Image (tube, grey):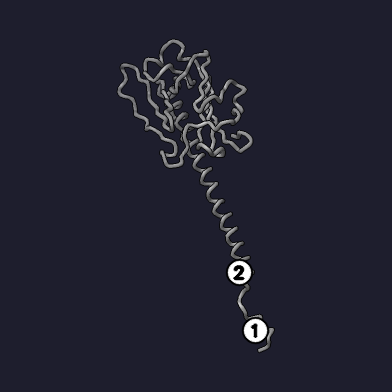
């Protein structure tokens, strides 16, 4: 067999093996990153959907059943919904308590990433001073408990006790923005706004440069 034929039958050179290995490693890394980022996005979107669903279900119940419905946001990640019955009503239904991402490790919480600008609703009186940002129309102080009235509007409450929901001034419409995210991960940030007068709910995600619906 000639020398040329022997050279053709040799295996790949060390340089070729290293090159192929490097290419495979790069492609594998890209594939892994491609699965991690969508996973984080999916987790953030799922948490935002939980907040939106809780708000919309509370509003729908308030309108259809003609009873006020309160919603309380408790840090780090819990949403509690409760019907405010009349004294003559039978016991109201119990809404399940919600924990963002079912309280999974690495799940979202009520969190406003430092330095993020306000949502596009900022021009209409919505603020971003805290993760649970509620603005009372009468300029009063609002806690983390809010309420949908039988007309579908969102109003403020002076405290968690049921009696406070009917106190003077607490039935004024408020605008609300609920920020959620994972500390240290700006791309996970989501914002949910509620227009006080109408109860309309909007959801936004942070693109890295701007808020988008």
- Foreground: 139 or 212? 139
Q: Residue at x 55, y 30 (%)?
A: 202
Crowding at dot 1, Cα within 10 Å, few <14 / some 14-19 / many 20+, comes out as: few
Under tag 2, what secondary structure? Answer: helix
Q: Residue furthest front?
A: 14
Disc 1 to disc 2, C-alpha distance: 19 Å
Q: Position of residue 209 (x, y in %)?
A: 64, 36
Q: Residue at x 50, y 33 (%)?
A: 180
Residue 112 to residue 66: above or below: below
Q: Residue furthest top?
A: 168
Do residues under tags 1 and 2 come within 8 Å of each other at their CB atoms?
no
Q: Quadrant of residue 8?
A: bottom right
Q: Residue furthest bottom?
A: 1
Quadrant, the N terminus:
bottom right
- The numbered disc on residue 6 is 1
Quadrant, the C terminus:
top right
Q: Is residue 126 left or right of residue 62?
A: right
Q: Is residue 61 left or right of residue 188?
A: left
- The numbered disc on residue 179 is none
Q: Residue at x 61, y 66 (%)?
A: 18
Crowding at dot 2, Cα within 10 Å, few <14 / some 14-19 / many 20+, comes out as: few
Q: Quadrant of residue 63?
A: top left
Q: Position of residue 146 (x, y in %)?
A: 45, 22
Q: How many marks?
A: 2
Q: Position of residue 203 (x, y in %)?
A: 54, 32
Residue 112 to residue 15: above or below: above
Which residue is labeled 2 in the image?
17
Q: Residue at x 59, y 30 (%)?
A: 115
Q: Quadrant of residue 21?
A: bottom right
Under tag 1, what secondary structure? Answer: helix
If you read the primary sequence from the N terminus, does the residue marked by circle 1 or circle 2 appear first? 1
Q: Position of residue 211 (x, y in %)?
A: 60, 33
């Amino acid at each position: 067999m000639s020398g040329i034929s022997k050279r053709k039958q040799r295996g790949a050179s060390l340089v070729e093996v290293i090159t192929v290995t490097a290419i495979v490693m790069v492609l594998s890394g890209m594939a892994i990153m491609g699965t991690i980022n969508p996973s984080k996005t999916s987790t953030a979107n799922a948490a935002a959907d939980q907040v939106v669903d809780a708000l919309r279900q509370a509003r729908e119940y308030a309108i259809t059943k003609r009873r006020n419905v309160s919603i309380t946001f408790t840090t780090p990640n819990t949403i509690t919904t409760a019907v405010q019955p009349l004294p003559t009503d039978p016991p109201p239904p119990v809404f399940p308590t919600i924990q963002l991402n079912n309280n999974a490790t690495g799940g979202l919480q009520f969190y406003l990433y430092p330095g993020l600008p306000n949502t596009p609703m900022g021009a209409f009186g919505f603020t971003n001073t805290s993760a649970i940002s509620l603005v009372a129309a009468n300029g009063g102080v609002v806690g983390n408990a809010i309420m949908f009235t039988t007309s579908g509007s969102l109003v403020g409450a002076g405290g968690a006790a049921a009696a406070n929901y009917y106190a003077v001034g607490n039935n004024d419409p408020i605008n609300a923005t609920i920020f959620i995210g994972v500390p240290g991960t700006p791309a996970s940030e989501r914002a949910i706004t509620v227009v006080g007068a109408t109860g309309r709910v909007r959801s936004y995600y942070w693109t890295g440069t701007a808020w988008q619906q």
